[in-house]
Image (tube, grey):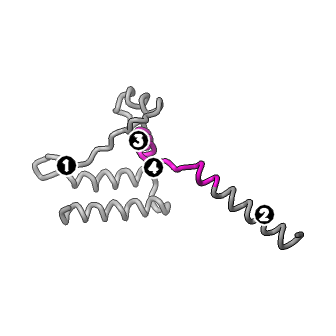
Amino acid sequence: MTERERAINQDLHVLDEAHRLGRLSRAEYRARRRRVLQSLHDSSSVVTARKTLLPSATTTSRTRRVHAMPSGDTSVDAGHALTTLLSMRPAVAWKPLLAFLGGAALLILVACWLFLGG
């Protein structure tokens, strides 16, 4: 990663943090982010290489509907990006987690019963 890319990443991090903490409105955040990302363009107007987000194999019907819509609407693009990011999120193994929490709760109940009423 070049120094320029590191500086842009740092700018994006600061911008994201300000938006997360509520210091920027959504419109202001998007405008500033767009300006920062425009600096990724080379002076010859060639876009530097980027890793694109590809939808996973388990796309939902909502994701497919977004693909079919025209891409001129930025709210559609934002919805598509959010859907893509959510589909890329690692799945949580709920069953083992619930079994562990249930077992821990049962142990606590048994311990309380033994110490208090046993």
- Kindly identify the amino acid type of the residue bearing the numbered disc 2: Leu
Q: Position of residue 24 (x, y in %)?
A: 44, 58
Of circles 1 and 4, the one toward us is 4
Tell me whether circle 4 and circle 2 mark residues in contact (CB < 8 Å): no
Of circles 3 and 2, the one toward us is 2
Taking depth in this image into account, of 21 and 49 the one nearest to the observer is 49
- Kindly identify the amino acid type of the residue bearing the numbered disc 1: Ala
Taking the image as shown, residue 29 lies to the left or right of residue 99, namely left
Mark 3 or mark 2: whose residue is earlier in sequence: 3
Q: Residues within 10 Å of mark 2 (few under 14, many from 20)?
A: few
Q: Residue 49, labelled with which disc? A: 1
Mark 2 or mark 1: whose residue is earlier in sequence: 1
Q: Secondary structure at mark 2?
A: helix
Q: Secondary structure at mark 4?
A: loop
Q: Residue 90, labelled with which disc? A: 4
Label 3, label 1: how many angstroms apart (C-alpha)? 20 Å
Label 4, label 3: how many angstroms apart (C-alpha)? 12 Å
Q: Position of residue 62 (x, y in %)?
A: 47, 32
Magenta-tinted stretch: 78-99
Q: Is residue 3 above or below residue 102?
A: below
| Mark 3, residue position | 84
> Which residue corresponds to the image point at 26% horizontal and 61% vertical from the top-left?
8
| Mark 2, residue position | 109
